[in-house]
Image: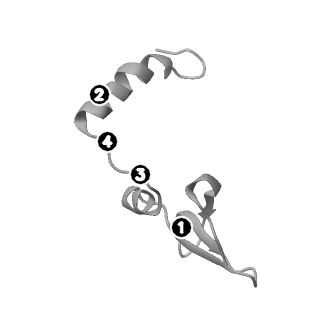
């Protein structure tokens, strides 16, 4: 079984009885996939990440928000 690290994360979009976005956790030798739903807590648990503190979040937005304009320069 090949386990995937966060840098190799593969995402699936599924429609039907299980609509939604899913993360591939592992690819089995027989071709089957081990998947789980994409959700903020699930992604945090899968990686080495953690939630940002209020101060880290404020610093992130202060640094990056000015560069987050719509693609067509609206607003």
Q: CA distance from mark 2 to mark 1?
A: 34 Å
Q: Is residue 60 left or right of residue 53?
A: right
Which residue is disc 3 drawn over? 49
Indicate the secondary structure of the residue bearing disc 1.
Answer: loop
Which residue is disc 2 drawn over? 58
Residue sitting at x 41%, y 20%:
63
- Using a 10 Å C-alpha cutoff, classify the residue at mark 4 as few (fewer than 14 neighbours), some (14 to 19) or many (20 or more): few
Q: CA distance from mark 4 to mark 3?
A: 9 Å
Residue sitting at x 41%, y 51%:
49
Q: CA distance from mark 1 to mark 3?
A: 26 Å
Q: Does residue 26 sit above or below 58 in this rendering?
A: below
Nearer the observer: mark 1 or 3; the answer is 3
Q: Is residue 55 left or right of residue 14?
A: left
Indicate the secondary structure of the residue bearing disc 2.
Answer: helix
Q: CA distance from mark 4 to mark 2?
A: 9 Å
Q: Would you identify the image quadrant in which residue 45 lies?
A: bottom left
Which residue is disc 4 drawn over? 52
Give residue 59's position: percent from left, percent from top.
33, 25
- Using a 10 Å C-alpha cutoff, classify the residue at mark 3 as few (fewer than 14 neighbours), some (14 to 19) or many (20 or more): few
Q: Residue most toward the left? A: 54
């Amino acid at each position: 079984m090949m386990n995937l690290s966060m840098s190799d994360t593969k995402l699936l979009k599924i429609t039907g009885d299980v609509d939604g976005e899913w993360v591939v956790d592992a690819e089995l030798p027989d071709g089957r996939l081990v998947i789980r739903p994409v959700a903020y807590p699930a992604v945090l648990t899968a990686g080495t990440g953690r939630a940002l503190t209020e101060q880290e979040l404020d610093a992130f937005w202060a640094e990056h928000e000015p560069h987050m304009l719509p693609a067509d320069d609206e607003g």
